[in-house]
Image (spheres, rainbow, N blue to C red):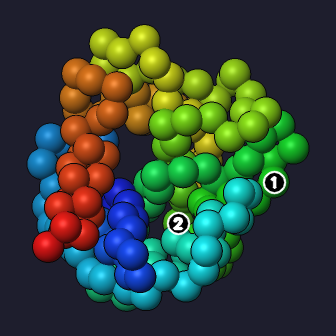
Amino acid sequence: MILAVDVAYLKDAAVVGGVLFRNWTDEKPIREIVLSCAVPDKYLSGQFYRRELPCIAALLKQVPEALDCIIIDGFVYLGRAREPGLGKHLRDLLEEKVAVIGVAKTPFKDTPKSCEVRHGKSDNPLYITSDGIKEERAKLLIKSMHGKGRIPTLLKHVDRLTKTSALH
């Protein structure tokens, strides 16, 4: 099972959402999960995980299914130095039992060109990093995901799910 997660922020709370699906080419999720959580920390560049990891950990408690991979909105590793990002901290939290793929829409400073992948008909790249799965394989999997635009359908879906829930 694959889980794509995203977090949206309100003034003093966060909404974390997840969509579960079986196959990389799926157009629709099997299940959606949304919950709110307190924002545990302020945003600090390069320490995004301090803010998002507690929310994702809370969401994972609602997922009894065995996961093969989690896709996050962000980086597993940061820059050429490959400093641990949100995805690496998540993988460590899961005792390295689940692969994590980071899909970022904008590059972190010094992000290698080798992280770029173009999805659908878009000329704008996404930035892929991973742990527990080779980055070349991760890029192929993200590229194979359903959708004609820059952002794969299910990643757009989880983004909308969290943002819509954050507004209500």
Q: Is residue 115 left or right of residue 68?
A: right
- The image quadrant that residue 135 belongs to is top right
From the image, tell me which residue sits under label 2: 98
Residue type highlighted by circle 1: Glu
Counting from the top left corner in percent of width and height, residue 25 is at 24, 37
- Indicate the secondary structure of the residue bearing disc 2: loop
* Of marks 1 and 2, the one in the foreground: 1
Which label sits on residue 166?
Answer: none
- Mark 1 touching mark 2, by CB under 8 A? no
Seen at 60% across and 80% down, the residue is 41
Displayed quadrant of residue 36: bottom left
Is residue 65 at all visible to an observer of this figure?
Answer: no
Q: Quadrant of the C terminus?
A: bottom left
SS for dot 1? strand
Please tell me which residue is depicted at 27% across the width and 23% down the height of the picture.
149
The answer, for residue 86, to whether it is visible in the render is yes
Q: Percent position (x, y) of residue 28?
A: 12, 48
Circle 1: is it few (<14), some (14-19), or many (20+) Cα within 10 Å? Answer: few
Image position of 111 with respect to 18: above or below: above
Q: Which residue is mark 1?
A: 83
Residue 162 vertical position relative to residue 168 in the rendered view, above or below: above
Q: Residue furthest right?
A: 81
Distance (Cα) linking label 1 and label 2: 19 Å
Residue in the picture at 31% in, 46% down: 155
Q: How far across and how far down the image is residue 99, in percent? A: 54, 58
